[in-house]
Image (spheres, rainbow, N blue to C red):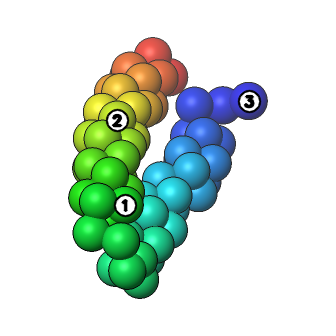
Amino acid sequence: MKPYELEGPIIACWEICEDLKFLSKNSEDQEAMQVLDGIRRLYYWKFEELFNKFEKVCEEARLKN
């Protein structure tokens, strides 16, 4: 697998953040809403960091070619 082929799977995983946002907004339990929103933020940051690393790997691969 080439580095650039990972973009789609990474973005597909990132969609969990939107799912958590939806669940949080539609929960009637205030505590559950806060927990879900915290989890969403955590995973957003983690995926953002992963995507930044992905972009760096792709740039390094382009420079080698």
Asked if 51 appears above or below 16 in the picture, the reply is: above
Looking at marks 1 and 2 on the same chain, the residue that comes earlier in the sequence is marked by: 1
26 to 3, vertically: above or below: below
Q: Earlier in the sequence, mark 3 or mark 2?
A: 3
Residue at x-position 35% and y-position 27%: 53
Q: Nearer the viewer, residue 52 or 18?
A: 18
The residue closer to the viewer here, 65 or 39, is: 39
Three-letter residue code for mark 1: Ala
Residue 2, image x, y percentages: 66, 31
* Horizontal side, residue 1 vs residue 16: left or right: right
Quarter in which the N terminus is drawn: top right
Q: Residues within 10 Å of mark 1 (few under 14, many from 20)?
A: some
> For numbered disc 1, what is the local secondary structure?
helix
Q: Which element carries disc 3, helix, strand or loop?
A: loop
Comparing marks 3 and 1, which lies closer to the viewer? 1
Rate crowding at label 3 as few (under 14), some (14 to 19) or many (20 or more) other CA atoms within 10 Å. few
Q: Which mark is residue 32?
A: 1
Front residue (pair 60, 10): 10
Q: Which residue is mark 2?
A: 46
Closest to the observer, 28 or 53: 28
- In the rendered structure, find residue 1 and report the number of the disc placed on it: 3
Residue 20 x, y percent position in the rendering: 44, 63
Identity, as a three-letter code, of the amino acid under mark 3: Met
Q: Amino acid at mark 2?
A: Lys
